[in-house]
Image (cartoon, rainbow, N blue to C red):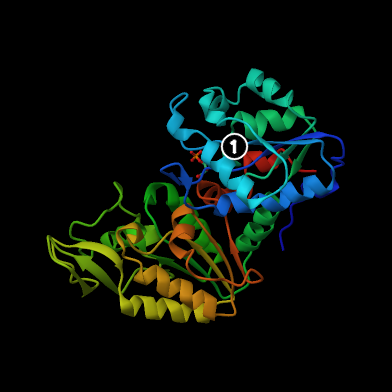
Amino acid sequence: MRKMTLRSVKEADVAGKRVLVRVDFNVDVVNGKVVDDFRIRAALPTLELLHKGEAKKIVLLSHLGRPQGRDPQFDLVPVEKHLRELTTVPFELHENLRFDVREEKNDPEFARQLAELGDLYVNDAFADSHREHTSIVGLAALLPSYAGLNLESEVEHLLQALSPSHPALAIIGGAKFETKEPLLQKLLSTYNKVLLGGVLGNDLLKARGLPVGTSLVAGVIAPTSLAGNERLLSPVDLIVVGEGKGGRTSQTGDVRASEKIVDIGPQTAEAWSKEIAGAQFVLWNGPMGVYEAGHTSGTDALATAITNSACRAVIGGGDTIAAIMKHTFDPEKVFLSTGGGAMLQFLIDGTLPGIEILKK
Ligand code: 3PG
């Protein structure tokens, strides 16, 4: 099994110190309320550890969204309010880091300003560790720096996903074939089978010469080296919608020119659930259908298959987590990653800039 040894917050002497903690509180806020607090909850164990270790002050650093300057829409106040309802640990929350344009530039002067706010630095923002930003890289170099508990747990589980027990199954959905192609190539070298749903599934069908109607597809066609790989599975049936009509199930190959693919079909869901039942390890990133428009049956079927199986699983990606939150997974077997882009990048490179800097 791969191992990576990081300086852990568990080893840090935090008593009497001011601790800066980079967290990822980039969560959905609607009408001033946090609607999905998965990432906020993920930071609680580190905050509790620091409090128990008698840290003098805990200063949390996060970004929210992609504001162009100081836009009140991206204020962290609702997040702060939500966190105070979740924990009695005293903390200060710095304003949205991206209100300062220097955050995304790994700016040395901004790093020095942030470093003045603390004596130690902890990175518990796995989901941002692919970004070479000031609060992730520059700041970590200026103070004694450590990995938080969530970041450590992410690394441990994603390392397992890089060397999975076999039979190993990867399920990849969502869009952006262009950015996911290197990942697919890599997964095919380690996993027994790779199943493609969502827009990526459409891309594969198209590359295999099958009709996709008006479905969303990438701007590039999957190369034959990939599309010709028989361990890369595309759906055998699909849920499609036509103009102004309700949905229907279509065999792959029968999608009409006016129709749009919105989910994998029931036969595919059943066949892929059987693949999950037979796997030792499942890696899943990306929903199978347009879940935000209510096309959740494929994603739900696969989530149910994972809950019913003895396999170990790592599931991640913001949309995927949002789509499967209604299911209850055994935390001993199933790890839910807070990472979106960071998870995919870690799976390709085996590390991230914000993690490299915390290595012993
Ligand atoms: C994410 O949501 O993946 C992280 O918070 C990073 O956000 P970013 O893609 O805006 O850097």
Residue 225 at what x, y percent from top left? 39, 59
Residue 25 in sight here: no
Which residue corresponds to the image point at 55% horizontal and 31% vertical from the top-left? 96
Residue 350, compared with residue 209, is above or below; it is above
Residue 286, compared with residue 104, is above or below; it is below
Quadrant containing the C terminus in the rendered view: top right
Q: Nearer the viewer, residue 311 or 55?
A: 55
Q: Nearer the viewer, residue 197 or 193?
A: 197
Residue 346 at what x, y percent from top left? 59, 50
Under circle 1, the secondary element is loop
Question: Picture quarter containing residue 63?
Answer: top right
Question: Picture quarter containing residue 15?
Answer: top right
Say few, some or many: other residues with alpha carbon within 10 Å of mark 1 (under 14 / 14 to 19 / 20 or more): many
Residue 275 at what x, y percent from top left? 47, 78
- Give the total of numbered labels: 1
- Look at label 1 and name its amino acid: Ser
Which residue corresponds to the image point at 65% horizontal and 55% vertical from the top-left? 154
Residue that mark 1 sits on: 62
